[in-house]
Amino acid sequence: MSYPRTIFHWIDDAEVAGAGGQTFEKRSPMDDRVIAAVTRGSAADVTRAVDVAAAAADSWSRLPAPKRGEILGRAASRLRANERELAEIVQAETGKPWKNAVAEVGSSADLAVFMESEGSRFYGKTMTSPIPNRSVRTERSPIGVCAAIMPFNSPLAGVAWKAFPALLCGNAVVAKSHELTPHTAVAFGKLLQDAGLPRGVYSVVQGIGAEVGTPLVEDPRVGLVSFTGSVPTGKLVQQIVSARPLLAKVCLELGGKNPLIVCDDADLTVAAEHAVASAFIDAGQRCAAGSRLIVFDRVYDAFREALVARTAAVKVGSGPQDDCGPVISRQSLDRLLRAVDGAVQRGARILAGGQAVASLAPGYYMTPTVLENVAHDDEVSQQELFGPVTCLYRAAGFDEAIRMANATAFGLTGAIHTFNNNRIEQFITRYRAGLVSINGPTYGAGPHMPFGGVKNSGNGFREPGTEALDVYSEWKTVVVNHDPARV
Ligand code: NAD
């Protein structure tokens, strides 16, 4: 695979330069080399992309949903056929270990298959009416032009999660690539073109958030903004939409500070295995990362020992056998090292890691890091770090563990390790989050599973699953008086 030296917008089914002619550098997280010059888009480029999408949306929406689904089915086949090439692009941009890059292609194909079959359902419902000769039903209608704004951590799955349901529902999509993972969404556009998606239905703009994201969100022709990213940017997006003369639907999928509770009856080996996977897959750059490990006092010392031993076995690198890749940028690595230093100055103890990996420099690799003795109100306990750092907390018992699990502004995912049915049911009921996992990791999504959060982790929508159709379509209630003279 040759990663392109220049990365363009994808507008009207072609790679195009920006109107301003400016670019910025894309560096490899694996070795800090500049690997591409990326088109630095402007408001004019956004307008052009939305023009194209608005012109293409109507005829696409009138293609029957099962036919739209067929195109997604062909996209799934192409994803699988081009697995290696796409995984290479994902890895070049993120540095994630090879097995994780490959898995991202597979899960994107799985989602296309799931959404293809939704095209054959796409159900509404019929309702009775107290009025004779009247029928009432609901049907889904498309929104028109959808903006898809993505984070960097899983660039292919990120765009697939938004584009596949949006297209199935009959919308045109303008995606805004993350500036640190710019090319994946363009490669995805070429794949959709090969699969037979009509021209102009899917476009991509490149650039800095404030320079292209804001004009995209402001464009009155954009009827839905589907945003995945951090809480501050999500709140800003909602404010921008609120200030528009014409409102739009806003779907926010935001961060997490996800707890994993280890009770005194847990299988500590299994719990440590899941805690390590939750904390360090994708170098902890996952909304569902397990960043707070809350352990019953009675088993704290034994779990800590198992956790530290398991953490030491995590292979850092981007190769086929590796588990934990680099973080996305030099700034991110520096921010994480500062956060750990600050926590240590406030009393935290480092049980593992806490440093950049010297042997892999200048790549942005950090040793998987476990901290203990961190206060619950410390910023490291409250803010999403988005890196390979997790904290260990001691809880006197179940009630305290639940209270600690709920004591952040986030509510995305959480896990508990126990074989006590009462604790399991209590955790499901009392821990406030969009996804709970029993005796597993803090992550766990699939094409058929609704995913999203409560509190600052989201604004109530769920992607994907059939629930994603509720993001990308509007319900229309239809009332037909088929014999109005005889009511
Ligand atoms: P970010 O908020 O910095 O950026 C997200 C996107 O917003 C980028 O494409 C960026 O260019 C764009 N953006 C920035 N300013 C903008 C503006 N003014 N207007 C419009 N768009 C703008 O987030 P990030 O660091 O890329 O991603 C990490 C975050 O994403 C974490 O908080 C993580 O938890 C979250 N995330 C959530 C989920 C989920 O499903 N809930 C999944 C993955 C990641």
Image (spheres, rainbow, N blue to C red):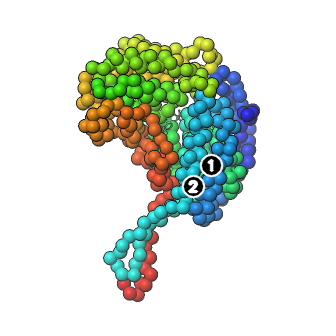
Give the total number of marks visible in the rendering: 2
Q: Is residue 2 visible?
A: yes
Q: Nearer the viewer, residue 106 or 203?
A: 106
Badge number at residue 76: 1
Cβ of mark 2 under 8 Å from ligand 1: the answer is no
> Residue 2 appears in which quarter of the rendering?
top right
Q: Which residue is drawn at 64% across and 63% down?
A: 59
The Cα–Cα distance between marks 2 and 1, rounded to whole angstroms, is: 9 Å
Residue 82 appears at what percent x and percent y?
68, 42
Q: Looking at the rendering, in which quadrant would you find the C terminus?
A: bottom left
Circle 2: residue type: Glu
Q: How crowded is mark 1: few (under 14 residues within 10 Å), some or many (20 or more)?
A: many
Q: Residue at x 54, y 61 (%)?
A: 120
Where 221 falls versus 315 (above or below)? below
Badge number at residue 116: 2
Contact between marks 2 and 1 (CB within 8 A): the answer is yes
Q: Is residue 251 visible?
A: no
Image side of residue 236 versus residue 358, left or right? left
Circle 1: residue type: Ala
Where 478 falls versus 219 (above or below)? below
Q: Residue at x 34, y 32 (%)?
A: 416
Cβ of mark 1 under 8 Å from ligand 1: the answer is no
